[in-house]
Amino acid sequence: MSRAAVIGGGPAGLAAAEVMADAGLQVKVYEAKPSVARKFLMAGKSGLNLTKAEDLSIMLPHYTDAASWLTPALRAWDSTAVVAWAEGLGQEMFAGSTGRVFPKAMKASPLLRAWLRRLDGRGVSILPRHRWVGWDGKLPIIMGPDDTVSSVDVDVVVLACGGASWARLGSDGAWADWIGADVQPFGAANAAVAIEWSDHMAKQMGQPVKGVAWRAGRHRSRGEAVISHRGLEGGGVYSVSRGVREGATLYLDLLPDLSVDDVAARLDRPRGKASLANHLRKTLRLPPPKIALAQEWGRPWPVETLRIARRLKKLRIAHAGLRPIDEAISTAGGVPAPAFDDALMLRTRPGVFCAGEMLDWEAPTGGYLLTACFATGRWAGRGAVKFVQP
Ligand SMILES: Cc1cc2nc3c(=O)[nH]c(=O)nc-3n(C[C@H](O)[C@H](O)[C@H](O)COP(=O)(O)OP(=O)(O)OC[C@H]3O[C@@H](n4cnc5c(N)ncnc54)[C@H](O)[C@@H]3O)c2cc1C
C-alpha cells in the first residue's frame, strides 16, 4: 500500500487526505498544533461561509491572475460540489441573498467533527503536535511532541501549511524558509484599513457603515464596514484591501445610488442657519456615522454645492495602510505558479504537492477562500494518487 504524508491539517490538507484515503493510500496527517483546523473553526465563528452559489464562469475572475492555473481544480470541485460534500457530512446548507453559502448551524464544529469521523473511518491517522521542520533528501523531517526529530519514509507528500496570518492558529509561514521554491513575499489580503481617527469619531466606534461604495485602484465594493478603534473593518473594505496594499488611493462614496448632480440638487435646497452636518442629514438623510466620516475626511468644505456633492461621492480616506498581516483574513504570496506543474506538484521535488493558502493566489471573502482551499487540496490529493498509481 502506498504511504502518503499530509503536512498541515487545515481544510486543504484534510481535503487531500480524503481523496488519497478514498484511493486506498495509507494517509498520515502531520499537524503542528495540538488539534487540526483551528483557522477553519475560527472561520466558523463568523458563520462559516463555505462557498458562493455561483457558476464557475462568474466565480473564476475573483481569483484574478491565479484563475488560469486554479481552473482545473475548481472545475473538478466547484461550489455545487462543496455544497453536496457538506450535505453528505450531514450539514443542512443555505444561500443568503448575496449567494454566500453557509451551513444552517452557522459554525464549523459539527461539519469538522463529521469530516474527522469520516477520515478516521477511512483509515487516516492524524498526528497532532507534529511539526514539519525541513527535508532529509526527498523526505520531510518531522519534530514530534517530545522534540524528537525524524524523517518520515513516504511515497508521496502533500504540503498544506496555510498562509501567514493568525499565526497562533498554526499558519505562521515558517515553511517559506525551507520549502525550496521561490516563495513570493506574503502580504495581507482581506485586511482591515488602519486609521488614526480624530477625537470627533469617538462616538462612532462600533458603528456600521452601510449603503456605501469603496474603491481602491481596480477594486470596487458595495459591502459594509465597521468603524473601530483600529480603523475600518469588514467585508466592504476587505474587498478593496488589495488595491490599498498595491498603493492605490482609497475612496469612499457615501451616496452610491445618487449621481453627483442629484446630490448637488438636494444640497441646493434652502439651508437657512443649519450647520452643514444638519443640512446633510436633512437633505441627504445621512445617518450619524456617515456624517461623521464626511466631516472626518471632507473638511475643509468647499463653498459650491456641486463640489461638496463631488466630495461626498469621492471621499479620500486618510489611512495608515493595512492592519498587520497577522490580523488579515487571508494572505497573498506563497508558492508561485512557475514552481508547480498542472497537478500542483513542485517541479524541483517530484512526489511533493502543495495545496491551499500556501499557494500564491488570493480572492475576496464570500466563500472563495475555502472553496479554493478544498479544491486545491483535492486536486493535489488526486495528483498524488496518480503519482503513486500511474
Ligand atoms: C477570522 C477568519 C474568518 C474566516 N472566514 C472565512 C469564511 O467564512 N469563508 C472562507 O472561505 N474563508 C474564511 N477564512 C479563510 C480560511 O479560513 C482560510 O483561507 C483557510 O483556513 C486556509 O486553509 P488551509 O488549509 O490552506 O490553511 P490553514 O487553515 O491555515 O491550515 C494550515 C494548517 O497547517 C498547519 N501547519 C502550518 N505549518 C506547519 C508545519 N510546519 N508542520 C505541520 N503543520 C503545520 C497549521 O497548524 C494549520 O493547522 C477566514 C479566516 C479567518 C482568519
Image (cartoon, rainbow, N blue to C red):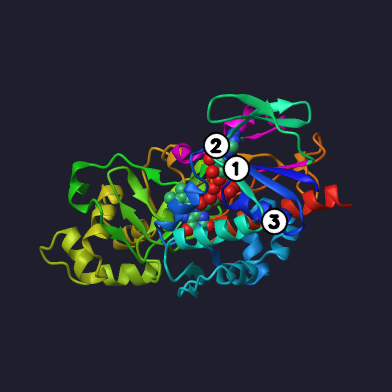
Q: Name the residue type under label 2.
A: Ala
Which residue is labeled 1 in the image?
8
Q: Position of residue 230 (x, y in %)?
A: 32, 42
Q: Which residues are magenta?
A: 156-184
Determine whether the residue tagged by mark 3 lies in a helix, strand or loop. helix
Which residue is located at x 80 percent, y 52 percent?
A: 385
Above or below: residue 29 compared with residue 83:
above
Is label 1 in contact with label 3 (beta carbons under 8 Å)? no
Identify the residue under disc 2. 32
Earlier along the polypeptide chain: callout 1 or callout 2?
1
2 vs 3, front mark: 2
Residue holding disc 3:
378
**Of 102 and 325, the residue lying toward us:** 102
Please rate how many residues cluster around mark 1, counting C-alpha atoms within 10 Å: few if below 14, some from 14 to 19, many from 20: many
- Residues marked 1 and 2 touching at CB (< 8 Å): yes
162 sits to left or right of 388: left
Name the foreground residue: 160 vs 314.
Answer: 160
Mark 1 near ligand 1 (CB under 8 Å)?
yes
* Residue 69 in sight from this viewpoint: no
* Mark seen at residue 85: none
Q: Is ligand 1 closer than 8 angstroms to the Cβ of mark 2?
A: yes
Q: Is residue 159 magenta?
A: yes
Specify whether residue 349 is in view: yes
Residue 311: image location, x then y, percent: 35, 56
Q: Give the vertical position of 377 relative to 107 (above or below).
A: above
Dot 2: what SS?
loop
Residue shown at the point (30%, 39%) measured from the top left: 196
Distance from the alpha carbon under mark 1 to that under mark 2: 7 Å
**Residue 324 screen position, x and y as percent:** 43, 37
